[in-house]
Amino acid sequence: MLKLDRRLLVATVASLILLAPSSPSSAGDTFAGEWTLGVAQMPDYEGSEDSQIMPMVGFALDLGGYAIELQGTSLRVDLLASPVLDAGAVFNYRFGRDDVENASVAALPDIDATVEVGMFSAATLPLATGAVKVSGEVLVDAGGVHDGVFGTFTLGYGSVLSERLRVGVAASVSAASGGYAQTYFGVAPDAATRSGLDAYSPDRGFKDVGLDFSVTYDLTPQIAMTGLVSYRRLVGEFADSPIVQAGSPDQLTFGLSLTRSF
């Protein structure tokens, strides 16, 4: 079932917009940037078969080689003034779980939102008419909600098809610690009694594999429209969770956005 989330939230899929290479900017610019506004349909929570509609908000600032980017719920500060390598700090806001459509999952204790901190690194290399990007990040819970560690590795390729048209594709894999697994996918015995779900205590391991695809079309030299599709497949003990069995291991996100460069 589709529901409308009325809170001003930031959709994680905003990061997919960066899969496609940006329009060329003037060489030697000491300050440049872009902002993004859009809308996305995404899972209600990890493992849900219900969807919610959320706004996408993002921005990127290039400060003479250093960069600050808001990609979905993650704020990244790139501390390397390099055209090939990126590395720095990342701060992520992870939404909690409450007010969900599924009656069994709704009977479980609510999960608070939290802030995670960590580091990221990436390398971008030219290939054919585009570029290959290899990236990874590790996040640690700083809000005391799951007290765990979460990591993602991504391999992507963006290509320029014409003067106005660009595409991007990326494959990813993520893993999580036992604390993360138990918080978002576990079912305590007392909660099992209330919800009707089986008690479950997952361990650390690979959480999901994913495939993302985006298409960007330049409406003007400064304004671009991007459509995107993101697929995540929960795997291992995460997919075996009764929470996922009551929903779906297949997680789809669709988005449409406008980006204004300056």
Image (spheres, rainbow, N blue to C red):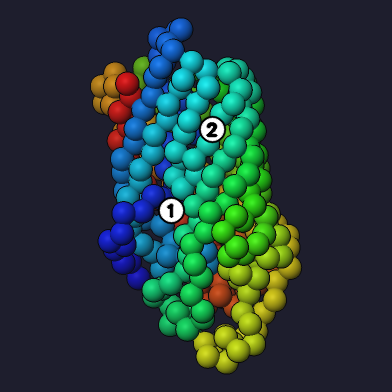
Q: Which mark is residue 253?
A: 1
Q: Amino acid at mark 1?
A: Thr
Between disc 2 and disc 1, the foreground one is 2
Q: Residue at x 28, y 61 (%)?
A: 6
Q: Residue at x 29, y 18 (%)?
A: 221
Q: Residue at x 67, y 55 (%)?
A: 149
Spot the residue most to the top.
28
- Say if 231 sits above or below 44 in the image: above
Which element type, helix, strand or loop, lies under badge 1? Answer: strand
Quadrant of the rendered structure where residue 43 is? bottom left
Mark 2 or mark 1, earlier in chain: 2
Q: Is residue 23 left or right of residue 156?
A: left
Residue in front for this viewpoint, 248 or 262: 262
Give coordinates of residue 171: x percent, y percent: 60, 42
Give coordinates of residue 125: x percent, y percent: 62, 21
Instruction: Report crowding for label 2: few under 14, some 14 to 19, many 20 or more residues within 10 A (C-alpha).
Output: many
- Say if 65 sits above or below 43 in the image: above
Q: Which residue is mark 2?
A: 77
Give coordinates of residue 250: x percent, y percent: 53, 62
- Say if 75 sits above or below 145 in the image: above
**Can residue 41 be seen from the camera position used here?**
yes
Quarter containing the N terminus? bottom left
Which element type, helix, strand or loop, lies under badge 2? Answer: strand
